[in-house]
């Protein structure tokens, strides 16, 4: 792996054998982009890739030179205001009102490994030979300001991590209005723009549109990455599928307002920008101050989307997620939310926990409703001490009883929120985000605490830490149930109000950092009304996240499938819930609810005591199955086989690292009468290994991958003795085990 710099042509070539990234200092000193894609051999001179042309009516950089205009040059960190009319990566409002900047190459350094970005979640290395980092300093002499562009190339992943740092070394204050994490100019627009969008309970549905001249984007201005859009997009060549074709994934390690944009210009070049949403953003950079953007990660694959996803999964699972839980199979939990909502007593909780323990559950999680004056969603948030009417011996007492049953104990918090009816609000009404003279808009009867203020974060930390110190808590579900409105902080001066959203999320990260550092044994699960903040920033602190409040197995197929494009299966919080389902009022078989949740962290969200004896037996078998296979399901190589967005069938699979075990999830939405014979071609197996399927007839890996696994089952009304009756929302997990040594 190497970072080459060719002095004579001022060309950078980053390559790890799998991918190459080429940049060059342009004639005016700005940094140009030449290539990103599959690795190419190095050479001194790639100048022929610089597309220069005398275009009529084009503004040019130098008098007398009609060939060179930034309007048609591909660039690394472009600004608006000179000869480039596309949306910029950086824009700075200066004291005289000008927004024109001129950042040119000054110097660069190369270092082994990857330095952290203070206060921000990032990918990391555990050894210096895992990556190399190139930092290029661009300099604007008039402003006396620098941009440090940082590129980390991983030795084992076709992935490049990027960020930018702005440094004000002048003597006047500057206002950053655009500071993107990444810009990539591509030479053509023959791509499809793929994004993962939706709503509460319908998160991360896959959406595809062709690129064409103009701007396509997804974004958030809500203060969270949001249910509505995700800070992850793909550009793929038309015809690319899961197993073949070119695709680039762009992911932002950030949990706040973001913009992911592709702009196609007059000459069909494509500019991708990704970073903090410039909408409403205005960061004042005083003399001597620096601003660090979040990190963005680009992954390239010429072997389809599955390969791209596996790169993200491996990288994010092992070098973004951290802590004691990072590599461990996750405990099978039971969460009481859908079992009781706010209607519980300690005895009721213990009865649910006891039932769960009997069936093999390992962790009991007490959700919302245990604190302050909370008996519904209009009171109590902010008062993080137990409601002694419900829990006479407090959280410590309940945790003790639960652990005495043989279960671990987990607890729900919503640290960033406050109800008007709370001691915290009564003591500090000015701690909420609200604009002077304007009525603050409620959301779920609650208001957002101003986490840009360190004293607010400290107050919440102290309350949470007190509980973690006094009670035996091994898991925390960190919820966040509304978006930000009336964005204004009483602690910020007028010329810094545009910093609020970013400062807010930095406060969230600070609290997470303190808690995970001081209570390293605790497993954190992030949540924001389900999947409203399911992003890589959260993964850095919480290795798993509640993927959606929609727990219906049919809906979950789409949500989990869409989520899997960027996020590892070990991060996907998935539970079996009661029927009729509480979100869509649909009834699906217990087996299917478990077969969907199995490709996630797996748990239950219902009172198991209410099930029939037969269902309890099924639950016991499901839990035993998960204990046997969860390491493969959560940490194996994941392949999407058939998309729920394209038809009646969904299939996916996880393969163990040694390729000796594979689990294939197969799901049919609606049953069919007298249907055709069906097969699904598997992926990732060892072609020379022989696998038993569900303990039965053995098949070689090559056969299963090239001919396929036969999934034909009985049709309606044709059920043979011994076969399970077919139904809507049917499913099966096929277990493949290698049963002999390789036959080569
Ligand atoms: C929203 C979450 O997504 C649910 O799982 C639950 O924790 C509720 N909040 C509790 O208020």
Image (spheres, rainbow, N blue to C red):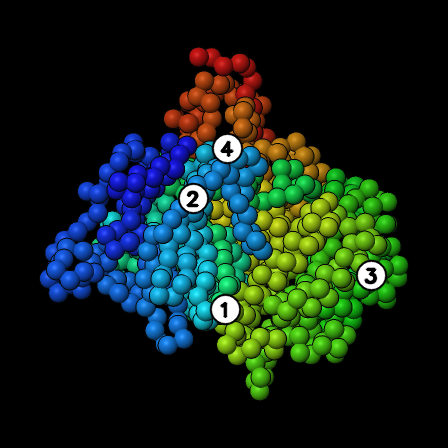
Q: Nearer the viewer, mark 3 or mark 4?
A: 4
The crowding category of the residue bearing disc 1, from other C-alpha atoms within 10 Å (few below 14, some 14 to 19, many at least 20), is some
Q: Is residue 402 left or right of residue 628?
A: right
Q: Which residue is mark 2?
A: 109
Q: Is mark 3 within 8 Å of ligand 1?
A: no
Q: Which residue is mark 4?
A: 129
Q: Are marks 3 and 2 in contact (CB under 8 Å)?
A: no
- Identify the mark nearer the N-term, 2 or 4: 2
User: Residue farthest to the right?
Assistant: 393
Q: Earlier in the sequence, mark 1 or mark 2?
A: 2
Give the structural element (helix, strand or loop) at label 3.
loop
Q: Secondary structure at mark 4?
A: helix
> Residue 612's spot in the image, x, y percent?
73, 46
Residue 432 image-quadrant placement: bottom right
The answer for how far apart the CA atoms under marks 3 and 4 are is: 54 Å
How would you rate the neighbour count of disc 3 (Cα within 10 Å): few for under 14, some for 14-19, many for 20 or more? some
Query: Counting other residues with Cα less than 10 Å from the Cα at mark 2, is it few (<14), some (14-19), or many (20 or more)?
Result: few
Question: Which image quadrant: the N terminus?
Answer: top left
Q: 260 or 532: nearer the eye?
A: 260
Image quarter in which the C terminus is found: top left
């Amino acid at each position: 792996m190497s970072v080459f710099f060719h002095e004579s042509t001022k060309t950078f070539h980053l390559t790890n054998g799998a991918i190459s990234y080429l940049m060059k200092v342009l004639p005016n000193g700005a940094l140009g982009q030449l290539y990103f894609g599959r690795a190419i051999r190095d050479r001194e001179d790639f100048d022929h890739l610089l597309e220069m042309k005398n275009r009529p009516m084009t503004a040019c950089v130098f008098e007398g030179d009609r060939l060179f205009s930034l309007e048609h040059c591909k660039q690394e960190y472009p600004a608006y205001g000179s000869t480039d009319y596309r949306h910029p990566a950086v824009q700075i409002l200066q004291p005289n009102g000008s927004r024109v900047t001129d950042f040119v190459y000054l110097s660069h350094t190369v270092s082994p490994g990857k330095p952290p970005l203070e206060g921000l979640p990032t990918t990391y290395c555990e050894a210096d030979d895992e990556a190399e980092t190139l930092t290029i300093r661009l300099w604007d002499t008039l402003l006396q300001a620098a941009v440090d562009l940082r590129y980390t190339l991983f030795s084992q992943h076709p992935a490049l991590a990027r960020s930018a740092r702005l440094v004000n070394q002048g003597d006047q204050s500057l206002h950053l209005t655009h500071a993107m994490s990444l810009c990539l100019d591509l030479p053509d627009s023959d791509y499809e723009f793929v994004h993962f969008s939706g709503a509460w309970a319908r998160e991360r549905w896959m959406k595809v549109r062709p690129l064409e001249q103009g701007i396509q984007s997804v974004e958030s201005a809500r203060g969270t990455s949001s249910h509505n859009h995700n800070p992850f997009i793909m550009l793929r060549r038309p015809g690319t599928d899961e197993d073949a074709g070119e695709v680039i994934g762009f992911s932002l390690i950030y949990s706040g307002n973001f913009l992911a944009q592709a702009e196609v210009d007059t000459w069909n070049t494509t500019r991708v920008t990704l970073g903090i949403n410039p909408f409403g953003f205005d960061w004042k950079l005083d003399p001597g101050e620096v601003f660090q953007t979040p990190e963005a990660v680009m992954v390239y694959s010429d072997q389809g989307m599955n390969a791209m996803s596996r790169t993200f999964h491996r990288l994010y699972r092992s070098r973004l997620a951290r802590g004691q839980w990072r590599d461990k199979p996750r405990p099978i939990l039971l969460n009481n939310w859908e079992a009781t909502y706010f209607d519980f007593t300690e005895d009721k909780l213990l009865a649910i926990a006891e039932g769960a323990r009997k069936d093999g559950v390992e962790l009991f999680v007490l959700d919302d409703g245990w604190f302050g004056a909370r008996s519904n969603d209009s009171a109590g948030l902010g008062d993080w001490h137990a409601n002694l009417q419900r829990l006479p011996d407090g959280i410590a007492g309940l945790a003790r009883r639960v652990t005495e049953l043989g279960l671990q104990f987990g607890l729900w918090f919503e640290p960033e929120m406050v109800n008007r009816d709370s001691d915290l609000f009564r003591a500090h009404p000015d701690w909420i985000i609200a604009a002077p003279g304007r009525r603050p808009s409620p959301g779920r009867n609650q208001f957002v605490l101003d986490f840009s203020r360190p004293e607010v974060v400290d107050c919440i930390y102290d309350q949470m830490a007190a509980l973690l110190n006094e009670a035996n808590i091994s898991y925390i579900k960190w919820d966040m149930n509304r978006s930000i409105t009336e964005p204004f902080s009483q602690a910020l001066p007028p010329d810094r109000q545009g910093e609020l959203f970013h400062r807010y999320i930095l406060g969230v990260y600070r609290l997470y950092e303190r808690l995970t550092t001081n209570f390293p044994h605790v497993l954190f699960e992030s949540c924001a009304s389900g999947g409203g903040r399911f992003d890589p920033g959260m993964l850095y602190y919480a290795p798993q996240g509640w993927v959606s409040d929609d727990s219906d197995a049919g809906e979950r197929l789409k949500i989990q499938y869409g989520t899997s494009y960027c996020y590892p299966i070990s991060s996907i919080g998935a539970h079996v819930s009661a029927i009729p389902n509480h979100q869509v009022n649909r009834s699906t078989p217990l087996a299917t609810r478990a077969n969907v949740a199995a490709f996630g962290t797996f748990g239950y969200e219902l009172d198991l005591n209410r099930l029939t004896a037969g269902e309890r037996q099924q639950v016991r078998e499901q839990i035993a199955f998960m204990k046997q296979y969860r390491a493969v399901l959560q940490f194996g190589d994941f392949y999407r086989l058939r998309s729920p967005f394209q038809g009646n069938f969904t299939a996916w699979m996880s393969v163990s690292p040694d390729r000796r075990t594979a689990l294939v999830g197969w799901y049919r939405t609606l049953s069919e009468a007298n249907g055709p014979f069906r097969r699904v071609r598997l992926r990732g197996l060892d072609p020379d290994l022989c696998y038993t399927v569900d303990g039965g007839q053995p098949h070689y890996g090559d056969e299963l991958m090239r001919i396929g696994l036969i999934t034909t089952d009985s049709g309606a009304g044709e059920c043979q003795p011994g076969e399970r009756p077919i139904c809507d929302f049917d499913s099966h997990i096929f277990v493949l085990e290698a049963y002999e040594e390789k036959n080569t």
